[in-house]
Structure formats: structure tokens, C-alpha cells
Amino acid sequence: MSNDQTINKVIQNLILTALYEKQGIDALYPELRSKCEILVYRQEQRGQPIWIHSTFRTAKEQDELYSQGRTVPGKIVTNAKGLQSYHNFGLAFDAIFVGHNWNPPNRNWWNDLGTEGEKLGLEWGGRWPNADMPHFEYHPNFTWQDIESRIKIVQDIDKADSLLAKIKTMLGL
């Protein structure tokens, strides 16, 4: 499947997520959902069970998280504004440990989790300079900018159609 086809499918999933108010794992892009379910199963089998804490976020929710520690009290928890996070496109999730949340009994649990996710083709936030241990994302050969630009094109076409309709009305056409 080409990048354009994949991006179109991501956007279709976003539309369905919005229309049917999908949440949790159900809001993830189907290919990522399958990988997430496999990761949950594998971690259960190794005795380090996880639960999926965060999946899809709206741009508004992302902006609210971004403002934490900047314009509202709290600790900075993200460097991504709305539409700059793979969570906004159903292409990311955060996993934490059952009964331990963000504090597993052994730091190696994070490395085990990250390695299992990477085996599935996921990018693990634990490898980043500012490590985000619970975070996984999936975006083979495209970026959030590619998706955002496609969404903006649709928004621009919609605005242009609306403007054209107003002009036609004003001209009596």
C-alpha cells in the first residue's frame, strides 16, 4: 500500500472514530490496534501485564495537555501541540503496568516492554532523548505533518466551496 493510501485509511479511521465516538484501543488505526493487542498478550505471558492508558486524543485535549506547566499549573507532560501528536491520529498509545502504573517493580520492565513493541514494528518513546517510557507510535514512512497537510487540504476545499457558494448567492447565480 502506498503512503497516500495509508494516509487516506488513517483519515478514514479518524472519521469513523469521531462519528462513532470510539475510545480506547477501538480508536486506534486498525493495524496499530492489532499490534497493541499482541503487545498486551505478550506482556501478560511474560508476567509483566500492561493496560493501555491513552490512545486517541482530540486536538483540543492535546492542546490542554500541552498547556500544562506552560500556561496552566502542573508538570509539562508533552512537547506536542494539537495535531502534532500521533495520538491525534489514532497512531499512538501509552501503556502502563497493571498494579504498578508508571512505577514497575523493576526498571527492566520498561526495557522489556519497549523491546517487545519494537519487535512489532512500533516506535518506542523510551529511545528518545527525553524518554517517554509508556509511549508507542506507528507511522511507517509518513509523519504527522503528512496527515495534517492532507486534512488542511480538505479544510481548504471545504472553505473554498463555502466561499464559492456565498459568491454565487451574492451574484444571484
Image: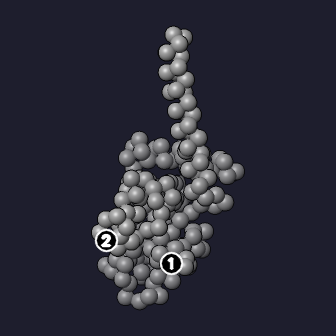
Residue contact at pointers 1 and 2, CB within 8 angstroms: no
| Residue lying farthest to the right in this orientation | 2
Q: Is residue 164 above or below residue 114?
A: above
Q: Is residue 57 above or below residue 50?
A: above
Left of 110 or right of it: where is 102?
left
Residue 169 coordinates in the image, percent (x, y): 49, 15
How many labels, in total?
A: 2
At label 2, the amino acid type is Gly
Q: How is the image coloured?
A: one colour
Quadrant in the picture for residue 100: bottom left
Which quadrant holds the C terminus? top right
Nearer to us in this view, 92 or 36: 92
Nearer to us in this view, 121 or 41: 121
Q: Using the image, tell me which numbered label, if any, was put on residue 74.
A: 2
Tell me, yes or no, if residue 47 can be seen here.
Answer: yes
Question: Residue drawn 59% across and 45% down?
Answer: 150
Q: Earlier in the sequence, mark 1 or mark 2?
A: 2
Q: Please name which of the two marks, 1 or 2, marks the residue nearer to the observer.
A: 2
Question: Mark 2: which secondary structure?
Answer: loop
Are there few (<14), some (14-19), or many (20+) residues within 10 Å of tag 1? few
Residue 84 coordinates in the image, percent (x, y): 51, 58
Left of 164 or right of it: where is 102?
left
Question: Residue drawn 42% across and 82% down?
Answer: 47
At label 1, the amino acid type is Asn
Q: Using the image, tell me which numbered label, if any, was put on residue 130.
A: 1
